[in-house]
């Protein structure tokens, strides 16, 4: 049985959060909503709107169609610069990249 669109989007958002090493709080701040609103959308008690999907995709630097395609396509499309650094805890900021540093 295949996933419905709502479940595909929730799964894709969860996969992107994990792949990027971000918390719901970080995503909520980027979207201009509360963490509780992201939590409700992720639990299925509220739906991700198309505008939400566009904002999530923009936040992660992927095309909205990649997000709608599901977790595998969404995480494959995630730019390397947005991926979690191994050993870094979720929700901690990435270190700044200094040009010319070794």
Image (tube, rainbow, N blue to C red):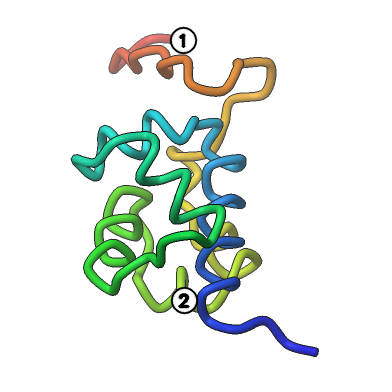
Q: Residue at x 28, y 74 (%)?
A: 50
Q: Closer to the N terminus: mark 2 or mark 1?
A: 2
Question: At which x and y percent is residue 21?
Answer: 55, 31
- The relative height of residue 44 versus residue 40 in the rendered view (above or below) is below
Answer with left or right where residue 15 lies relative to residue 93.
Answer: right
- The relative height of residue 61 versus residue 26 in the rendered view (above or below) is below
Question: At which x and y percent is residue 55?
Answer: 25, 57
Q: For the N terminus, give its image quadrant.
A: bottom right
Name the one closer to the observer, 40 or 80: 40
Name the one closer to the observer, 47 or 57: 47
Which numbered marker is on residue 102? 1
2 or 1: mark nearer the eye:
2
Question: At which x and y percent is residue 63?
Answer: 35, 69
Q: Secondary structure at mark 2?
A: helix
Answer with left or right where residue 51 lies relative to residue 9.
Answer: left
Q: Are marks 2 and 1 in contact (CB under 8 Å)?
A: no
- The relative height of residue 6 versus residue 25 in the rendered view (above or below) is below
Q: Residues within 10 Å of mark 1 (few under 14, many from 20)?
A: few
The residue positioned farthest toward the bottom in the image shown = 1
Question: At which x and y percent is residue 60?
Answer: 37, 50
Which numbered marker is on residue 68? 2
Q: Residues within 10 Å of mark 2 (few under 14, many from 20)?
A: many
Q: Residue at x 49, y 59 (%)?
A: 45
Q: Residue at x 38, y 61 (%)?
A: 62
Q: Residue at x 60, y 84 (%)?
A: 4
Which numbered marker is on residue 57? none
């Amino acid at each position: 049985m295949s996933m419905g669109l709502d479940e595909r989007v929730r799964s894709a958002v969860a996969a992107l959060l994990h792949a990027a090493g971000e918390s719901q709080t970080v995503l909520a701040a980027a979207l201009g909503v509360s963490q509780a609103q992201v939590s409700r959308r992720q639990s299925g008690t509220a739906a991700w709107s198309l505008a939400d999907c566009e904002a999530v995709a923009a936040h992660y630097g992927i095309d909205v169609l990649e997000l709608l395609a599901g977790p595998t396509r969404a995480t494959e499309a995630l730019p390397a610069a947005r991926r979690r650094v191994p050993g870094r805890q979720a929700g901690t900021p990435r270190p700044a990249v200094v040009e010319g540093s070794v």
